[in-house]
Amino acid sequence: MTNEKITAEVSGALPSDSGKPFLSRAECNVMRGFAILLIVLDNFTHLLNGVFLDNEYNYYPSRVEGFVANLMHPDSLLPFNFISFYCPYGVMLFIFLSGYGLVLKYEKGSGQNVGHKEFLWNHYSKMFSMQVKGLALVIMSLSLYNAQYYYPLKNLLLQVLMVSNLNPEQNIEPGPYWFFGMIVEMYVIYRLLIYKRKDAVALALVLVSLVAMAIAGPRGWKIVYLRINCFLAILPFCMGVLAARHLHFKSFSLHRGWHCLGWFLLAFVLLTATKFNFYSWLVMPVFVVATAVTVVKLLRRSRLLDNMFGWVGALSGVLFVVHPAVREVLIERANASGHYYGILFTYLLLTFGLSIILKPAFGGKKKEQRGAATAEKK
């Protein structure tokens, strides 16, 4: 997005291309575009009847086996199963970009003198504003679609305050909005534990999170509770932190086309392989991020694809908060009619159209102007 709210710390915070960061400002924007497309597609597809769910919070070997069986015996649902199997990871990419951008801004850039209270309030208020506007849209659309719709007051209050993730009952509605509570938790963890501290602190947090999830086991409320809170986010977030601190433009020779393609193939194979075991599944975010980084580097070699994903990236903050409202209205019709392809196209058309219309309401123009002004000063 110049991610208007969700990853605002990235836009306007990155050094100029002459500084040759590991990911340039434009590459971060392309990755946001790639990530939001994964989110928008998966959040609709995995709710279709007959489509295999991926292992996002619980781990079930049968889900992997079901996809493999469908791959060996393809039918009309294979494209949707493919999306459900490989696309639930856009959130991990936004988390990675958040860690990356926070370091560049608050440890290396213009935000080094920002105090703890100001930092936490700025980021909490950004998420709050974004979420409240999205909730208003979701409630309005669902109320128009279903006159009997009711959002329980307790659940609404917890969601507005972005603490629903801490509720063991996990009543988060709409579902994708669990991201807001989780990313606020990561802002707190970054500022209080990671900010300007040794890399060993970030690595220790990663180890603690992985051990905790391994102890919780593959299924049940414990693993779901951990993953819907910060434990899922710590690994990709700390990858972003360490990448911003230590990597540069020529790291891993990703600026070379054939090298980048080789790294992509390796990362994608390992991403797939880690899905076949619970313990390797826990470290899968490493290969999700690695795959996405190489995809972004490759996409930038095509001006058409670079411009397309960059445009989607500039719209990604609005797309994230808008798509649940469109999904809730169309998903029942898709399941009832079985016209998956046509309704998926309608869903994408309405989501993008509504996001373009509503973008000014989310402060997109002002944010872009501020980002441009910051770039000129630098």
Image: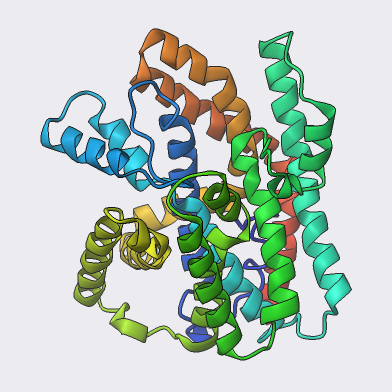
Is 61 placed left or right of 345 in the picture?
left
Residue at far right of view: 117
Residue 4 appearing in the image: no
Q: Measuring 60% from the left and 43% from the top, which residue is drawn there? A: 320
Q: Considering depth in this image, is 273 or 40 the residue closer to the camera?
A: 273
Q: Measuring 68% from the left and 10% from the top, which residue is drawn there? A: 146
Residue at far bottom of view: 198
Q: Considering depth in this image, is 282 or 344 the residue closer to the camera?
A: 282
Q: Is residue 173 above or below residue 224?
A: above
Q: Percent x, y for residue 179?
A: 63, 49
Q: Measuring 66% from the left and 80% from the top, which residue is drawn there? A: 194
Which quadrant: the N terminus?
bottom right
Q: Is residue 73 above or below residue 63?
A: above
Is 43 placed left or right of 267 in the picture?
right
Q: Is residue 218 above or below residue 351?
A: below
Q: Quadrant of residue 205?
A: bottom right
Q: Is residue 21 above or below residue 187?
A: below
Q: Percent x, y for residue 337?
A: 40, 8
Q: Measuring 47% from the left and 31% from the top, which residue is drawn there? A: 44
Q: Percent x, y for residue 241?
A: 56, 78
Q: Percent x, y for residue 112?
A: 76, 85
Residue 219 appearing in the image: yes
Q: How many marks?
A: 0
Which quadrant: the C terminus?
bottom right
Q: Considering depth in this image, is 14 or 42 the residue closer to the camera?
A: 42
Is 57 placed left or right of 128 in the picture?
left
